[in-house]
Amino acid sequence: MTAQVPPAGAQTERPDVAVRERPVPHPTPRDYVKIGVALSLVTALEVLTYYFSPQQAFLGVRMPSAVMIPVLLILAVIKFALVVLWFMHLKFDSRLYMRLFVAGLVLALAVFSVAFAFAFGG
Amino acid sequence: MAAEPHVVMGHEAATATGLDNRKVGMWAFLGSECLFFGAMISTYLLYRNRIGEGQPRLGDVYDIPYTSVSAFVLLMSSVTMVLALAAIQRGEHRKLRVWLMATALLGLVFVGGQAFEFTEFVRHGFTFRSSAAGSAFFMLTGFHGAHVTVGILMLLGLFYLSVLGRLPTGDSLRVELVGLYWHFVDIVWIVIFTIVYLFPQ
């Protein structure tokens, strides 16, 4: 049995399977290196942010926890998304993989949100 | 008639979904691992200030510049891992071995750095038994280190298979599966590094 490639836009019996006319080209090694550089820069920003924490107060500048925590979370989300979407190819792969991963991630975030509220909710 | 296999992302598999079951299984596993680490990170958040009188606080024993370098090393290992996958997909087996070994070595540097960090913490009196915060911290980071160690063993296994010539270009899925696991270990550290190390104490 040979592989069948349906025409572009064709509906399949499995809507959760992302069928494409031809395989989507993956990023090139040069793209991966660019993403690696971006990840390094964001990490540097994270560490820099740490030095403005209330304990460190680099150059006398104190970033309140109410500002520092959201900034750190946003930077972490950017790194997380870059690795998952590009290095793990979720941006290019079948939606089924995305659903399997996001299902676990959403449950984990629900648990984390409760713990976060207890830890920082005052 | 059974469902025809479809071409999805260049992977042809005669399954109902048209996707290789091994890769579906790996993503399901990684989804469950999100819960595993999510629960432990949450536990750490709840117990991070449970420290007995006279016991060192987490902020007292951390060495952020040192841990930042470790985090950077693990991040770069994700770059070398994805370059290994790109190499086998292009049939460049020598490059594959170079990138696989580079990834394993970067992983070893990370685990070695973590072991050194743990000994420093213990020397300062911050141990698994010293406080609830210590238990939560070592449980979380220890399990992550164990995952990295398993990943290193799998990378070395792939390297060995490649040396034996038993990792043909058409079988890049094995490298991709180990790569998915490795990147997952990396994203878990992205979260741990932010929440456990960089969050204000």
Image: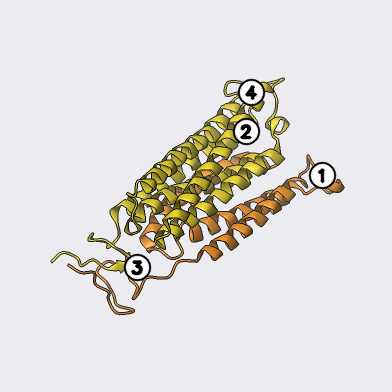
Residue A45: horizontal and vertical position, in percent? 70, 53
Q: Is residue B91 visible?
A: yes
Q: Given contact means CB atoms under 8 Å apart, are the residues at marks 2 and 1 in contact?
A: no
- Which chain gets the orange colouring? A
| Of marks 2 and 1, the one in the foreground | 1
| Of marks 2 and 4, the one in the foreground | 4
Q: Which residue is mark 2?
A: B48
Secondary element type, mark 1:
loop
Q: Which mark is residue A57?
A: 1
Q: Amino acid at mark 3?
A: Ala
Q: Which residue is mark 3?
A: A18
The chain identifier of the residue carrying mark 4 reads B
Q: Given contact means CB atoms under 8 Å apart, are the residues at marks 4 and 1 in contact?
A: no
Q: Amino acid at mark 4?
A: Val
| Of marks 4 and 1, the one in the foreground | 4
Colouring scheme, one of rainbow, by chain, secondary structure, one colour = by chain
**Which comes sooner in the sequence, label 2 or label 4?**
2
Q: Amino acid at mark 1?
A: Ala
| Of marks 4 and 3, the one in the foreground | 4
